[in-house]
Structure formats: structure tokens, C-alpha cells
Image (spheres, rainbow, N blue to C red):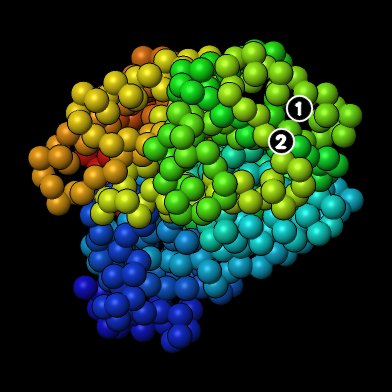
Amino acid sequence: MIADSLVRQFKTIVGDDNAWTDATDLHTYSYDAAVVDPVQPGLIVRPTTSEALGKTVRLCNNNALPLTVRGAGTNLSGGTVPLPGGVVIVTNGMKAILEINEADMYAVVQPGVVTAKLAAAVEAKGLFYPPDPGSQAVSTIGGNVAENAGGLRGLKYGVTRDYVMGVSFFDVEGNLVKSGSRTVKCATGYNLTGLMVGSEGTLGVFAEIILKLIPLPAHRKAMMAVFESLERASETVAAIIADRIVPATLEFLDNFTIRAVEDFSKAGLPKDAAAMLLVELDGHAAQVEEDAARVEALCRSMGATSVRVAQDAAERDRVWAARRAALSALAQLKPTLVLEDATVPRSRLPEMVVAIQRIAKRYDLTIGTFGHAGDGNLHPTILTDKRNHAEWERVEKAIDDIFDEALKMGGTLSGEHGTGLAKCRYLEKETSAGTILFSSRLKRALDPKNILNPGKIIAAKA
């Protein structure tokens, strides 16, 4: 419980209409998209200026109040679940696109800008912001940077960190820190920008972000390849990459996911397919057409029963909209959906697909698998009911096994969902005791009172 006198100080900073202690509001900000228990904070504040944001951070630190920054709360690792009685800073009061520079191809934004709105704004000027997390219609740039979000186009274009040129953020004492620049090259000082990307609000609070833009691709071509086995589909992914073709997107869906998505979206997906690949190529028209022909030939030689090329933009967009609806479609089938993020080297994808099938059978669970196959990022999605305690125990064992399999293949626990609360206990498995110690020392040095999103990435005991 935060004292009334302290609440009044926050209201003086952000305004009476931008600080809430009502029980309904507190509950709204007590959870995110991860399957972790909700935790009710003590206060919600919404700064609308950089100055107010800095003062809010300083007031939290002066009073040792745990502080969690939240955009849309779409993250899947518990990164925005607050501490009991703590403060949640909501960024949707700072949602301005401050600059789109066409000559130098960059944008400057506040952290609350919605990803899809930025993408549309730069596209209107003939430019392109490639990172496209599945939640882009509602997720915010600040959250994308904090979690180093990926997306469907990660194979060709990379992830959020590849587009962050600079950041301005407040340290725990409310001091404004600036790193990076608007120039293509910048080697000034420590690379604090790189440190802040993926830091999940544990080291500072973003005020402004400078993002790299690139020219909008001149031509696009999309196709759907249908397979009679999961193995052939996953082997085709490896074959496409091995043939030195880099599509903009290369997505994998198993039969369970295909059926769920088609029932949900009515996009015309083949419900009898064991698996399918969705491929899009972009770039110069001649190169796209040549690569598309090579991909189609490869798919057929690898056993695709059909390859359908989108005839126009409307057909292409309909299929991709259906793919982006995969999570929503699966979420309707059971009370609890656990969307995991196991990522392996692309050449090991066929093995990982088989391993997930084996784990589902071992624990008698329903696991739908889809994901960004071109960069080895699979999303095994477990459908369950957390209230069924016996089944939930099997789910937890299955998750352990999925992570173990990914790590054995030289993979990672998280390709794009971050660490948060959900994966911090696994972190040493992928890294080392020295890594945990180094990270803990860094955290303690920058946040002595441990108020910045405590317990995320580095477990509380560290």
C-alpha cells in the first residue's frame, strides 16, 4: 500500500488524471500475456512528458518503490508483471513520432508509439521499418526494444536491435542518459544502446529511441507450399537456406495449427495438410521472380504436394493475416495457452520439429507448432488448463524438455520473447555461473536499491 501523501506527490508530477489507485485499474496492470500469476501493483502512473518520466523514476527510487514499465503488456515472458504494491509506469502517454528523416533514413520516437503505426507512417514516405512482432498492431516500440522483439521478417531483416541507432533513457536516479546517434556510424563511449536493448526495464527507462529505416522493397511475391509430412516441410526450410536464398519470411505451420487458423480466419488454408510453409520474397523485381521460381522448384523437389503463388496483394495479405492470427486461433481452444520460443540453428530445425512431437507424445499433451522457421525460431504452443494440476505438472516437464533439446542442438531458450520471470531460472543452463554473477553485479551497480523491474532476467536470489 502506497501512502496517500506519496500518491499525491506522483499526481503533482503527472497530473491527477494520470495516476490511478482504483482496484479495477490495478488489476488491469497486474498481468501480461505470459502464463504467470498476476500481481497487483499499488499505483499506476502515466507520464506525458520526458521531464515527468524522469521525476517519476526519481521519486520511486527515493522511496524504494519497485518500478515496472509497461507498454501494451503483450510480452510472453512475464516481463511486465509488477511487484506487490509497486508502481507501474504506463508509456501510452508518450506516443509521439517525433521525427521521420527521409534524407538520412531514421525515425525518432517516444516509447509508447505502436509498432504498426510507425511502420505505416514510414511506409507512407516510401521507407521501411522491418521488425514486425506478431503483436505489432498493439505492441509498442519501447516494449519491442526492451524485449528485443523479433517477428516474421527476422530471417532477412533481423530483429529490433538491428534497427536501434540510439536511445535516451533515465537511470534509476532520474538522470537522463544518451547513447548512440542519428549517424550510421557512432563509436562514442560505451555501447549503452546495445546494453539497453533487451534489458526489459531492469537498467533504465526509455524516453526516446532513434530507429534505422531502409528503402521500401520494390516488389514482393508470396507462396504457400503444402506437405504430407512435418519432416519434409522442415527439411525444405533447411534446403532453401542451404541454396543461399534468403526470403523475407519463411513460416512453418503444423496440421493442428493450420486447422485452428483456418477455422478462425477462413483464409482458405488446406486443413488436410500435415504441414505448410508460407514464403515471401521481396526486393528488386527480377531477383524476386528468379528466387521465387527457385523456391517453388525446391519445394516441389522436396515433396510439396502443391505450391500456390499469391496472385495479387489481397490474396497475399489474407494469408499473412491468417498466419498472424495463429496465436488468437489457438487461444480459443483451451483455457490456458503456453506459447514457447525455442530457437535452434536453422540446419537443426527438422530435428527440433521431431523432438517436439516426441515430447508431446511422452507427456500426452496437445502441442501445436508454428513459427519463423527460416531463422530456426519455433513456437511450440501447449494447449492445456492450468487448473488441471496433474496435466500442468506434465506441461512444466515438457517445457523443461523442449528447452533441453534446443540447448543440446546449440540453440537458445528465447529467440524473441525475452527472459522475464518465466525463463530466468533457466538462464544459467544456456550461459554460465559467471554470466549470472557478472549480470548481477552490473544490475547492483546501476540499481543499488533493486527497484527497476526486480526479479526479471536475473532471478531475485541472485
Residue at x 61% of width, y 56% of height: 115
Q: Can you give x and y, in whole percent of width and height, for residue 292 in the image?
A: 76, 27
Q: Which residue is mark 1?
A: 292
Residue 250 lies, with reference to residue 171, above or below; the image says: above
Q: How many residues crowd mark 1 within 10 Å: few (<14), some (14–19), many (20+)? A: many
Residue 450 appearing in the image: no
Q: Residue furthest bottom?
A: 16
Q: Which residue is mark 2?
A: 309
Please state the total of marks drawn on the protein image: 2
Residue 284 lies, with reference to residue 314, above or below; the image says: above
Residue at x 24% of width, y 25% of height: 361
Q: Can you give x and y, in whole percent of width and height, for residue 430 in the image?
A: 36, 23
Front disc: 1 or 2 = 2
Mark 1 lies on a secondary structure that is helix
Mark 2 lies on a secondary structure that is strand
Residue 58 lies, with reference to residue 197, above or below; the image says: below
